[in-house]
Amino acid sequence: MKFEVAKTLQKKKKQIFELWMQNQLNDESLREDLMSNDELRNESDELLNSLLSSLNEENILNIQSSDFDSVNEILSGISITRARQGFSAKETGNYVFSLREALIQSLHKDYKGDPNELLSSTIQIVKLVDGLAAVTFETFIKGREEVILRQTDEITEISTPVIRVWDGILALPIIGTLDSARTQVVMENLLVQIVESGSSIAILDISGVPAVDSLVAQHLIKTVSATRLMGAECIISGIRPEIAQTVVHLGIDLSNIVTKATLASALRYAFTLLKLEVKKSIKSEA
Amino acid sequence: MYVVLNKDRMVIEKEQDVVLYRNRVKEFAVKIGMSLVNQTKLITAASELVRNMLKYANGGVTTIEVISKGRENGIRLIFEDKGPGIADINLAMKDGFSTGKSLGLGLPGAKRLSSEFDIKSTVGKGTSVTLIKWKNG
Amino acid sequence: MDRIPILRMGNFLLVTIQVDLYDRLAQNLESDLVQMVSKTGARGVLIDISALSIVDSFMGRIIGNIGSVSKIMDAETVVVGMQPAVAITLIELGLELKGVHTALNVERGMQLLKDKILVEDNEPEEE
């Protein structure tokens, strides 16, 4: 009689599960800090059930089979969750490899047949679980990429603050490279703040922008133009000498934008625009 | 190439259709969670193109689709008319060029506002414009 | 027949655009405004677009026309209340609103008009 791997594994489900749990709990990379052993048991139970119930003698040779769709779904879910919780790729991989270990151990236990058959069955299992491991790694990476994307968004938010330095005057210290994505964020934040604060002057300080080429200059000009459409005026400050030279050499026309060397001088200029004066107060000694 | 998740077709015949069309585009954009600025860019570009269609070809057919490229979702708009066609597309795509009395910003402007833009035209047969705005584009 | 109401505020006229203009409505607005400016001798026109979430080149042309026509009739035009998303889109679209001023809201717009007219009226006559 031909050896039926799938059927055998299904019959030994309980044994496989206990072996698998043992493997995981004995593994020194176990992260009890990130997941309780009970949660681990439940998760593993669900995956194993799904795997063994989907398995039959035909599809054991083909991990791509759609029979395994629900298994892949469960596994992807486990993998992405691990990625988000902070498990390492290796720890997540070990989850699947310890299962492989358990499947093989269980198969070899009490086997009383042809060793050649045992060998080919073992190879089948290895191939199958390797396929599952590939799914695991791929979704793990996807999970990590989501974290990176979210952090990138957060960094963009934080690095473009809009500060109300005075009634009607906003200051934007721009730090880092100004690409088109960042410009969008700067423009949106600035314009919304202009409406909310009723400001009429915005000072864009670019001393923290490492390089200004024609593209960056375009982004700055767009921001200034958009501000004007809203009825406010822009002053660009923090222009380093090298940047001034680059601007001229590139033939960029900033002639209808007021530029100041420092944020302080821009502020002073803004005060004059608003007809404000700053005077020393004379307090009499009593 | 792209997976089409949702599709809607609208015939444009008269000026009142412009507003109806814009509102439909907005519905789609809101449904995929597009940001306000991107929505505004998309609808403004759509407005330019649909007005063009009415003005030069007496109307046409528009298609609004939600498409997906891997993990990114977006809106694809197609404008097809059986108008006179455009003889020189390169010229038409230059700012300020207009055969009507308009500002000449419709085509090049719509292109700047979209993520991807394509235009095909045959003189005497008609014009077809396709634009895509990715949700985060 | 739909017509957009034009309010008179002292020396100025205020138009609040709340619906998407179509050809006939836009043309009517232009001619109605010209008539009013002439009749009242208004020195300023305020166009409130705070309710418009989309401004395309068609709308841009209307605003530009109103600005040019008013100028000929010795009135300055101010566009007020532009939404941030609209401003960003207009820049990308490449639409310059030439011949009109801009302000954050009606109050600021009126102040701007008052200042402008004061300056103009006080300019020394050519010898």
Image (spheres, helix red, strand yellow):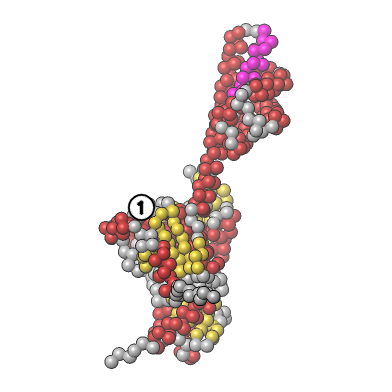
The vertical placement of A248 against A92, above or below, is below
- Tell me which amino acid carries mark 1: Ala
Q: Is residue B52 visible?
A: no
Q: Nearer the viewer, residue B26 or A175?
A: A175
Q: Nearer the viewer, residue A261 or A117?
A: A261
Horizontal side, residue B14 vs residue A14: left or right: left
Q: Measured from the top left, where is residue B46 in percent x and y?
A: 49, 61
Q: What is the chain identity of the residue bearing mark 1?
A: A
Horizontal side, residue A31 vs residue A158: left or right: right
Can you identify the residue that label 1 sits on?
A211
Quarter occupied by residue A254: bottom left
Horizontal side, residue A255 vs residue A137: left or right: left
Q: Is residue A98 highlighted in magenta? A: yes
Residue under the point 47% across and 63% down: A171
Residue positioned most to the front: A286
Q: Measured from the top left, where is residue C80 in percent x and y?
A: 50, 74
Which stretch did the figure color magenta?
A: A97-112
Q: Nearer the viewer, residue A17 or C116?
A: C116
Q: Is residue A104 highlighted in magenta? A: yes
Q: What secondary structure is marked by label 1?
A: loop
Image quadrant occupied by the N terminus of chain A: top right
Q: Nearer the viewer, residue A101 or B93?
A: A101
Q: Measured from the top left, where is residue A48 in percent x and y?
A: 67, 26
Q: Which SS type dominates the magenta stretch?
A: helix
Badge 1 density bin: few <14, some 14–19, many ≥20, Cα 10 Å? some
